[in-house]
Image (cartoon, grey):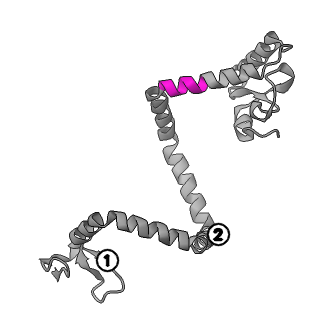
Amino acid sequence: MKLCSTCKIQKHSNEFSKDKTKNDGLQSICCNCRKQYRDRNKEAKAIYDKQYHTINKEKNAEYHKKWNIANKEKIAEQKLEYRTRTKGQRAEWSRQYRKSNKEQMAAKSAKRRAYKLNQTPDDANPEKIMELYKEARELEKSTGIKYHVDHIIPLSKGGLHHEDNLQVITATENLRKGAKTK
């Protein structure tokens, strides 16, 4: 049993947070009083935190940089564990997002189609472009590996949607490449 210094009520020790600096290893204020205090002073705390982070920006950045260097293996393990644990969940989240945001997904798709049309020159041969997409599908069926039709120079970098600027590559390579030229 311990006496809370704020509400002056004798409470069980599990109602206090830990504090290594205290003799008994517990804070002097109970969890309930601390929560009430935080709720009453939420705005003042937010202002204080913002000022503190602004003043100590370089110090915090240096600390995090050192911590990241010292804990590289731990960070890599955590990232790997997260990716493997959440792989199926992320796919499900993505499906749910697309399902619940159909208008946004349609707008995004329409924007890309329009962009592609604007980047398609008059001399582009639609039959040859379709052949590349068919080739990608056939390769996928025969090998079991997913293939994409990639813009060698990405549309976002001024490349054209033209058969001379298209290539069939594995999906992994295409996603790794992103909007880079190489």
Q: Amino acid at mark 2?
A: Ile
**Element at badge 2?**
helix
Q: Where is residue 118, by image quadrant?
A: top right
Residue at figure coordinates x 72%, y 25% from the top left: 143
Q: Amino acid at mark 1?
A: Lys
The residue at 76%/14% (across/down) is 130
- In percent of width and height, residue 5 lies at 20, 82
Residue at numbered disc 2: 69
**Residue at 27% from the left image edge and 86% from the top image edge:** 24
- Is 181 above or below relative to 16? above
In the rendered image, residue 85, in percent from the top left (x then y), is placed at 49, 47
Q: Residues within 10 Å of mark 1 (few under 14, many from 20)?
A: some
Determine whether, in the image, residue 69 is placed left or right of residue 154.
left
> Helix, strand or loop at disc 1?
strand
In the rendered view of the protein, which quadrant contains the C terminus? top right
Query: Which residue is labeled 1 in the image?
Result: 18
Q: Nearer the viewer, residue 140 or 125?
A: 125
Residue 105 covered by magenta stretch: yes
Q: Is residue 76 left or right of residue 43?
A: right
Residue 58: x %, y % from top left:
61, 72
Indicate whether 146 appears above or below 131.
below
Magenta-tinted stretch: 102-109
Q: Earlier in the sequence, mark 2 or mark 1?
A: 1
Which residue is located at x 52 percent, y 28 percent? 104
Q: Is residue 58 above or below residue 136?
A: below
From the viewer's side, name the closer residue of 152 and 156. 156
**Disc 2 to disc 1, C-alpha distance:** 29 Å
The residue closer to the viewer here, 24 or 84, is 24
